[in-house]
Image (cartoon, grey):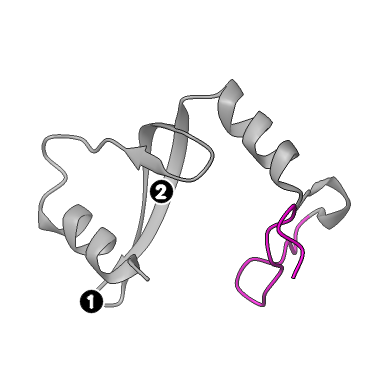
Amino acid sequence: MDTDRYQRTERTQLRRLPERGAYDRATVHAILDEGFICHLGFVVDGQPYVIPTGYAGSARRCSCTGPPGAGSGYGRAWTSASP
């Protein structure tokens, strides 16, 4: 297994403009280091949500902040997304 690259799976494979994507860790981490806002998508009880949020992290862990009024769906999304 190549540890210098993120694994490409059915769920992580780029479909829109795949020629612009990268799976090598150095490129992914450089992109994340340049920003601080992302869009977090999740599904709760069959309802999809996408919310803008801030993020910060290191090469192995990323933390996102949520809006105060996001409700329980935000927390439940993280629980269900945990490996």
Residue receiving disc 2 = 40
**SS at badge 2:** strand
Q: Residue at x 33, y 39 (%)?
A: 64
Question: In the displayed structure, does residue 46 sit left or right of residue 56?
Answer: left
Q: Amino acid at mark 2?
A: Leu
Q: Residue at x 63, y 36 (%)?
A: 29
Mark 2 neighbour class, 10 Å CA radius: few under 14, some 14 to 19, many 20 or more: some
**SS at badge 1:** loop
Of residues 69 and 24, the one drawn nearer to the viewer in this rendering: 24
Percent of width and height locating residue 61: 43, 44
The magenta stretch spans residue 27: no
Percent of width and height locating residue 34: 60, 22
Residue receiving disc 1 = 45
The residues tagged by marks 2 and 1 sit, at their Cα atoms, a distance apart of 16 Å
Which of the marked residues, 2 or 1, is nearer the chain's N terminus?
A: 2
Question: In the displayed structure, does residue 80 sit left or right of residue 2?
Answer: left
Q: Magenta segment range?
A: 1-16
Percent of width and height locating residue 50: 39, 51
Q: Amino acid at mark 1?
A: Asp
The magenta stretch spans residue 2: yes
